[in-house]
């Protein structure tokens, strides 16, 4: 009886033990699944540190499916990338190497590329993006892919490929649409593809991040294209929003020039003076001329003279000649005839622009006539010297006719023309019928039949 009791107890013990062993094995097998699920939940909540610890335990554990271990290694590496850990790159490359057929390999390259991009390793980022199958990415990730490849190419100075990448998303709604348009426009601008640049910059005029920089590029493009009316539309508002910007002097100068070239001199003045106030760089001669001429046309003669003086003594060129000429006009407008005479004399002595030279000489002689003690002789001497350089009778007649409007006596006007004839000592040939007339002591001078009546001495 006792023997039966012990036998029964032994059987029960064996069965219980077997059940306990089975239960333990089931628990040990199910625990990694629960742990994996918990780790994924932590990852989705962006608790990457805690998630990584759980995934690492699963990687090191034994006795569960290979696929689960591979996924755990992927997520451990991905957590390291998110945390920018020093071993992040090695962990992801180990996953790719150990499980090349795993469906998450494409995601691994994409995430690794983003990690390189964030750390400004643009060459490495491009290599990883090249191994990424874009067809496996969703719409948001595709936009991310194109922008970051474009920017990486941009930073590598590979502008052709950068432009291609940015172009893929410049018309698609995403968080990268505005920056993609900006960099695309910037590349087009540097390549002088101005119309493409304008189109892209125009999309940024209402963007909170680019609404101030886009018009700056646009007015520069309009300046190169000499579209001054378009500058006037954009530039004043841009100045109002960037009054203390380092770009203020340049914007003010371009705005002033736009008004200057459209002959709206009074409107140019405030921007011109803002430019002078904010600018710290040395002014070029052409800048001084624009400033001086604007003041001149706005009847600010004293300021105009100050700036014309900065040009007229620098070079023996057309700009100096114009500066002398307009400086003389400023003196004349303020009643300073002697100073005006000096400037007109300087202008006509410069053999650069013949028209300016003639006009300066005419006005100088007129002033000489008006101001001299013996006006006739002074005016005649000045004009006689200049007549020697006038190449044809047409210009000489223009000179004498001009001086008739200055109320020179007829005798003086005749004297001028006669001196020109004698200085040239020529006979004009004409195929038209002519009549011979004795003029100024010249035995014969051909006059066309339909000419105006010659001046006789």
Image (cartoon, rainbow, N blue to C red):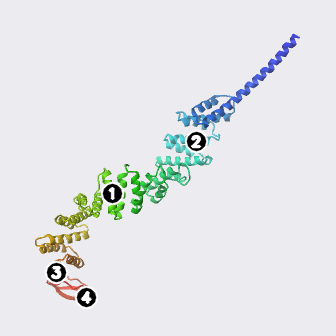
Pointer 4 with pointer 2, Cβ within 8 A? no
Distance between mark 1 and mark 3 Cα atoms: 49 Å
For residue 410, the mark is: 3
Name the spot of residue 24 as percent of width and height, x first.
73, 24
- Name which quarter of the figure residue 434 lies in: bottom left
Question: Which residue position holds label 2?
Answer: 109
Distance between mark 1 and mark 4 Cα atoms: 58 Å
Circle nearer the N terminus (1, 3): 1
For residue 270, the mark is: 1
Q: In the shown orientation, is residue 254 left or right of residue 24?
A: left
Circle nearer the N terminus (1, 2): 2
For residue 449, the mark is: 4
Distance between mark 3 and mark 4 Cα atoms: 23 Å
Name the spot of residue 208 as percent of width and height, x first.
48, 50
Circle nearer the N terminus (4, 2): 2
Q: Secondary structure at mark 3?
A: helix
Circle nearer the N terminus (3, 2): 2
């Amino acid at each position: 009886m006792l023997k039966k009791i012990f036998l029964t107890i032994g059987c029960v013990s064996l069965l219980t033990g077997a059940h306990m062993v089975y239960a333990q094995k089931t628990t040990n097998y199910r625990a990694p699944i629960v742990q994996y699920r918990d780790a994924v939940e932590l990852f989705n909540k962006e608790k990457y540190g805690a998630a990584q610890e759980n995934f690492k335990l699963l990687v090191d554990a034994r006795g569960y499916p290979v696929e689960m271990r591979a996924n755990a290694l992927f997520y451990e590496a991905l957590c390291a990338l998110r945390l920018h850990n020093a071993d992040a790159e090695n962990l992801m490359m180990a996953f790719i190497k150990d499980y090349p057929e795993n469906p998450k390999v494409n995601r691994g390259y994409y995430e690794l590329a983003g990690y390189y991009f964030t750390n400004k390793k643009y060459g490495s980022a491009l290599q990883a993006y090249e191994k990424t199958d874009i067809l496996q990415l969703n719409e948001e990730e595709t936009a991310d892919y194109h922008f970051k490849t474009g920017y990486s190419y941009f930073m590598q100075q590979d502008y052709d490929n950068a432009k291609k990448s940015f172009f893929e998303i410049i018309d698609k709604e995403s968080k990268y649409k505005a920056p993609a348009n900006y960099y695309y426009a910037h590349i087009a601008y540097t390549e002088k593809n101005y119309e493409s640049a304008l189109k892209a910059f125009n999309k940024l005029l209402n963007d909170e991040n680019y609404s101030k920089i886009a018009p700056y590029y646009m007015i520069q493009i309009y300046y190169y294209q000499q579209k001054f009316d378009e500058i006037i539309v954009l530039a004043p508002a841009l100045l109002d929003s960037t009054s203390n910007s380092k770009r203020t002097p340049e914007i003010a100068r371009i705005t002033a020039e736009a008004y200057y070239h459209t002959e709206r001199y009074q409107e140019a003045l405030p921007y011109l003076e803002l430019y002078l106030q904010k600018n710290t760089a040395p002014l070029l001669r052409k800048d001084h001329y624009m400033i001086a001429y604007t003041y001149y046309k706005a009847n600010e003669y004293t300021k105009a003279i100050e700036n014309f003086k900065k040009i007229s003594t620098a070079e023996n060129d057309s700009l100096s000649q114009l500066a002398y000429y307009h400086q003389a006009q400023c003196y004349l407008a303020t009643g300073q005839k002697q100073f005006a005479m000096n400037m007109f004399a300087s202008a006509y002595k410069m053999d650069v622009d013949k028209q300016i030279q003639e006009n300066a000489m005419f006005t100088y002689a007129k002033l000489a006539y008006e101001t001299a003690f013996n006006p006739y002789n002074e005016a005649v001497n000045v004009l006689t010297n200049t007549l020697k350089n006038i190449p044809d009778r047409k210009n000489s007649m223009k000179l004498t006719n001009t001086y008739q409007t200055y109320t020179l006596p007829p005798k003086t006007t005749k004297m001028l023309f006669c001196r020109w004839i004698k200085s040239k000592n020529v006979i004009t040939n004409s195929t038209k019928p002519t009549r011979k007339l004795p003029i100024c002591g010249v035995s014969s001078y051909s006059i066309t039949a339909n000419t105006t009546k010659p001046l006789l001495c």
